[in-house]
Amino acid sequence: MMRLHDYWRSGAAYRVRIALNLKGVAYEALSHDLRTGAQRDPSFLAINPQGLVPALEMNDACLTQSLAIIEWLEERHPGVPLLPAYAKSRAIVRGMAQVVCCDIHPLNNLRVLNVLRNDFGADEAAVNDWIAHWIRDGFVALEALIEEHGGQFAFGDTVGLGDCCLVPQVYSAERFEVSLEAFPAIRKVTQNARSVAAFAAAAPERQAGSG
Ligand SMILES: N[C@@H](CCC(=O)N[C@@H](CS)C(=O)NCC(=O)O)C(=O)O
């Protein structure tokens, strides 16, 4: 069985948990407590030299980077597609996913926040302003993209990669008390996705070690 190197509160791991559940792929979750620096333990660096979760370990390989893992799942288990049929549509969905994965999440990752705190003297209020700034910046764009292309979900009426990335980012916005008032389309599709069993089972509060 595949082993997902995980942490309950990790947005990047949450994306992969959703995708694994949507694909119906069984996995064993191994949690690494990011709060205690477990991701920098030599035993974990041997699995992912970047010291980040998620990593998906199987007999003959270990995959890293959530989008790469999800794209591999998409190729390996095409039965429940997370990307639409047409190339142009796929590019739009990947663009939505990358707003989250390339332009919001990396700026708000723990190691970045720790540099702000430790090397640039930012206090918690400044760190929270920084987090909110980048979430809002990305959500303005995502709101427009979902208004144009969305339906019941981020792209059309079928749940997919955009939702796998959006829902964990909304969880992070809620955690840091960023108002979603200005983003009704994001709120609607997130609510719909959260009602899908694969999303509900991947939620942070349902994972081992949460709290
Ligand atoms: N681009 C990576 C990001 C992975 C990542 O940043 N993971 C975070 C948790 S969400 C992490 O392990 N952080 C540990 C740290 O910052 O020290 C991906 O999509 O997998």
Image (cartoon, grey):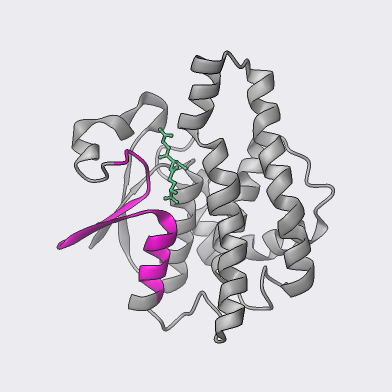
Residue 71, magenta (yes or no): yes
Q: Is residue 94 left or right of residue 157?
A: left
Q: Is residue 130 left or right of residue 5?
A: right
Q: Position of residue 18 (x, y in %)?
A: 48, 61
Specify the quadrant of the image occupied by residue 161.
bottom right
Q: Position of residue 198 (x, y in %)?
A: 51, 65
Q: Position of residue 40 (x, y in %)?
A: 29, 31
Q: Is residue 55 above or below residue 163?
A: above
Q: Closer to the camera, 159 or 195?
A: 159
Can residue 168 be seen by looking at this rendering? no
Specify the quadrant of the image occupied by residue 179.
top right
Q: Position of residue 118 (x, y in %)?
A: 49, 15
Which range of residues does the magenta coloring cover? 50-74
Q: Quadrant of ligand 1?
A: top left
Can residue 99 be seen by looking at this rendering? yes
Residue positioned 39% across, 62% down in the render? 68
Q: Closer to the camera, 72 or 121?
A: 121
Residue positioned 63% across, 24% down in the render? 127
Q: Is residue 196 above or below residue 112?
A: below
Q: Is residue 20 above or below residue 8?
A: below
Q: Is residue 58 left or right of residue 125?
A: left
Q: Is residue 59 above or below residue 103?
A: below
Residue positioned 61% across, 17% down in the render? 122
Residue positioned 70% across, 36% down in the render? 132
Q: For the N terminus, which image quadrant? A: bottom left
